[in-house]
Image (tube, grey):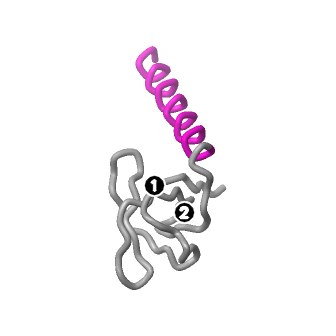
Amino acid sequence: MCLAIPARLVELREDERAVVNLGGIRKDVSIELVPEAQVGDYVIVHVGHAIGMIDPEEAERTLALFGEMAEAAAADGASA
């Protein structure tokens, strides 16, 4: 199974590289597959590569769901 997550592009770099924000963590990724991406756009990131663009509202909904899952897992671990 593969997991790709939405991330907000915060900085463009040379050689088809960019920096994205992944929940407060800044990560350098390749944007070779989405050369049209601009600062402020949301991209789907998989293994260090932006593999597609995503609508901002959908990205926010997905990130909120990931947050809820993390909270539930933390609560479950606290009760174990």
Measuring from the top left, give residue 18's x and y in whole percent: 40, 70
Q: Is residue 66 above or below residue 54?
A: above
| Element carrying mark 1 | strand
Residue position for label 1: 8
Q: Secondary structure at mark 2?
A: strand
Majority SS type along the magenta span = helix
Task: Name the residue located 53 percent from the left edge and 34 percent from the top edge.
Answer: 64
Q: Which residues are magenta?
A: 58-80
In this rendering, the answer to whether 24 lies above or below 65 is: below
Q: Residues within 10 Å of mark 2 (few under 14, many from 20)?
A: some
Quarter-wise, where is residue 3 in the image? bottom right
- Indicate whether 73 appears above or below 1: above
Tell me where residue 80 appears, x and y as whole percent: 46, 17
Q: Give the residue at the far right of this rendering.
A: 1
Q: Nearer the viewer, residue 59 or 51?
A: 59
On screen, residue 35 versus residue 40, left or right, reads right
Residue found 59% across the figure and 68% down from its top: 51
Is residue 79 left or right of 56 when viewed as pictured? left
**Residue at screen point 60% across, 43% down:** 57
Closer to the camera, 39 or 21?
39
Residue 74, disc: none
The mark that comes first in sequence, 2 or 1, is: 1
Q: Quadrant of residue 61?
A: top right
Mark 2 = which residue? 46
